[in-house]
Amino acid sequence: MENIENKAGDFQQKKHSIIDSKFPEVDALKLIHELEMHQIELEQQKEQLILAKEQAEIATKKYTELYDFAPSGYFTLTNLGTIAQLNLTGSKLLQKDKSKLINSQFSDFISADTKLLFDRFLDSVFKKNIKECCEVKLLLDNNRTINVYLTGVLTENSTEVLIAAVDITQIKLTKSALKESEDRYGELLNNLDIGIILHNKDTSIIFSNTKASQLIGLNKDQMNGKRVFDPIWDFIGEDNNYLDQENYPVNQILTHKTSLKKTIIGIKKREDESIQWFLLNGFPVFNSDGEITQVVISFIEITELKKLEIELIQARDQAEAANRAKSSFLTNMSHEIRTPLNGIIGFTDLLMKTKLDKNQTEYMNTVHESATILIDIINNILDFSKIESGKLELNIEEVNLIELIHHVIDIFKYDAELRKIDLLLNLDKNVPNYVFVDSVRLKQILVNLIGNAMKFTKEGSVALSVKTVATENENQCRLQFLVKDTGIGIKDENHQKIFQSFVQEDNTITQKYGGTGLGLAITNQLLALMNSTLELNSHYGEGSTFFFTVALAKSNHENNLEYLDCNLENEEESLKIKNVSNKRILVVEDNKINMLLIKTLLKSILPGSIILEASDGKKAIKLYKKEELDLILMDIQMPHKNGYETTTEIKKLKKYNNIPIIALTAGIMLGEKEKCLESGMDDYLSKPIIRSDLEQVLFKWLKLKNFVVKSIV
């Protein structure tokens, strides 16, 4: 600035000297013009200097503000530790006025336990002339301390040190709280009875708790840092096969970015042949960008449970094999027992229709009744087997309930008259005529209950009552069936016992009254299929009442009067043939007695028929090739070639002309009928063969227009 003023003074003097001098006028004007240009230049420089000064003042002010209000405290210290200069933040950090802190000792604010550390820090900055850092505590008023982080560097003249101080008290508290939390949760994890392993995103183990080490049998040092493909152990799947690395639990989570839940996995260490089994859960940990940073795996050992499961599976397989063997045994036994019974029942039935004297009739009735009882026992055993295996299903159809109930009563009328027991039937007037139910099973239940009551009643009465029970469902009717007797009754302690399979009230019952102990158990199981249960009211010596309630779908059946009139007209007629047609029927049966019985029944039903015989499947095929036949009655179990194989082979012959093939089988296990139909047979008759059933089959498949069919309930 002074140079510009001096130049301006010189310019004025030169101007006056030019004017006063005796230069030519032209030269003088030229010089004056140059001087004026210099003057303009000087004035511009002056303005620039003023502007620069203003900008410097603004910059200085900004610097001062930045310096004072910086987030860190700034101090300028001498080599003796005296505060030469500081910013406003520094004074606030020390909680003193700025003016009072100038020329004071910075070390006066350092706590005693960190003063030595500060002295070393300051000495090192001055002597080594390098940037130094340290962490100290500042002692403030009211004995309050804060933690600060100091950074020091020498000034250019190396006489002072510039120090930046940052308050890290909150950071220290946060770190302390975090460490305390980590310690607490670390202690918690280590005391959990569950193995916890934390994997990095490269699958390496970064943490494992104590239980994990105990379960796997490796210490933390052996586990930490190991990745899943390191050869420490192999993973085994539930099928006992080694898993590929991409199917390892951690890799699955990393690949699919989803959790694993209740996964059963085996671990086999390389140096050990045994397998440890674990129930494992795992989930990924994501950062704010949605990337997986860690994978957490938790697991418990289930080796003993796995062994038990294997044993249970083996036991189940053995039980299923035993059950199959039992079913096969029952099928064979059914066939073996029913085959001779078929002959006994069939021929006694035929004999009873011949002219017999009184004693012969009584003897034949006894034989026929004994055979029927034996059939009932076999049926009970087979029914129990089917129910027990869960293979019995109800066949729901529209049924004339009143007719069914009367038919059940008719079964026991003769026996009741002989024993002079009153057999009573009480029907509520609201009981519907037609309902939807499995008629065979409902009839079986009622027959079991009434038969049981008759067996244990010496005198008095047995009564079947059917009542309606209120229901809110308009499409259903609730019916209560009660069978009450005046028999010996049941002791209170035996009320539940009698519902168990193969169990009777006591040993004397079996000796005195007989029976398998299956009747009530089967009845209760059949009722369970109908969503009902058998109940009992009984007092020893006073009789018993068995009862159950079932909900049945209503029927909108309308009686066909013309059909009923037709049935009434023909009620007393048996199946007859007015015009006999010469039907050629092949009977394939290996049992001579059954062959004789079937031939006898056929000749009785179709007197003009021609009956051909074959004792096994091979002979049946030969006869079929030579003869023209109208129908085949095919036994199932035969030597050389059974009924299934024979039927299949016949149907493959070029000569086959859709001739009806009817199965004759002594087996009544579930699926027997379906198996016959699947093999190509057209219909099914079970042994012992009932004449009426045989008549129906013949009428159906021979299509004899002259059959008059009796109404059969």
Image (tube, grey):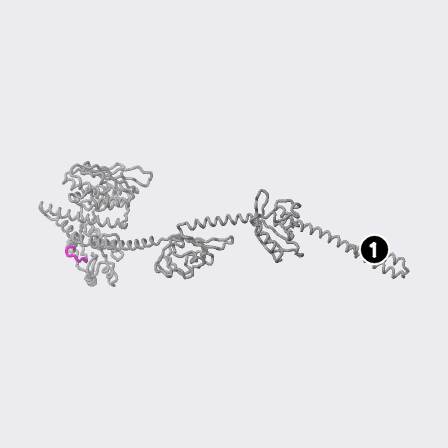
Task: Mark 1: give few (<14), some (14-19) or many (20+) Cα within 10 Å.
Answer: few
x, y percent for residue 422: 17, 37
Q: Is residue 279 magenta?
A: no
Q: Residue 405, relative to residue 335: is it above or below?
A: above
Is 306 on the left-hand or right-hand side of 47?
left
**Is 324 or 184 nearer to us in this picture?**
184
Residue 401 appears in which quarter of the rendering?
A: top left
Question: In the rendered view of the protein, which quadrant contains the C terminus?
Answer: top left
x, y percent for residue 289: 51, 54
Residue 628 appears in which quarter of the rendering?
A: bottom left
Label 1 SS: helix
Is 517 on the left-hand or right-hand side of 68?
left
**Is 334 or 223 nearer to us in this picture?**
223
| Label tally | 1
Circle 1: residue type: Gly
**Is 71 or 93 nearer to us in this picture?**
93
Is 490 on the left-hand or right-hand side of 141?
left
Magenta residues span: 585-594
Residue ID at (57%, 53%): 134
x, y percent for residue 644: 24, 58
Residue 636 appears in which quarter of the rendering?
A: bottom left
Which residue occupies the extreme right position in the image?
Answer: 22
x, y percent for residue 320: 27, 54
Using the rendered image of the protein, determine whether residue 61 is visible from the camera's viewpoint: yes
Question: In the rendered view of the protein, which quadrant contains the N terminus?
Answer: bottom right
**Is 307 or 177 nearer to us in this picture?**
177
Instruction: Please name the residue that numbered disc 1 is placed on.
Output: 9
Using the rendered image of the protein, determine whether residue 555 is visible from the camera's viewpoint: no
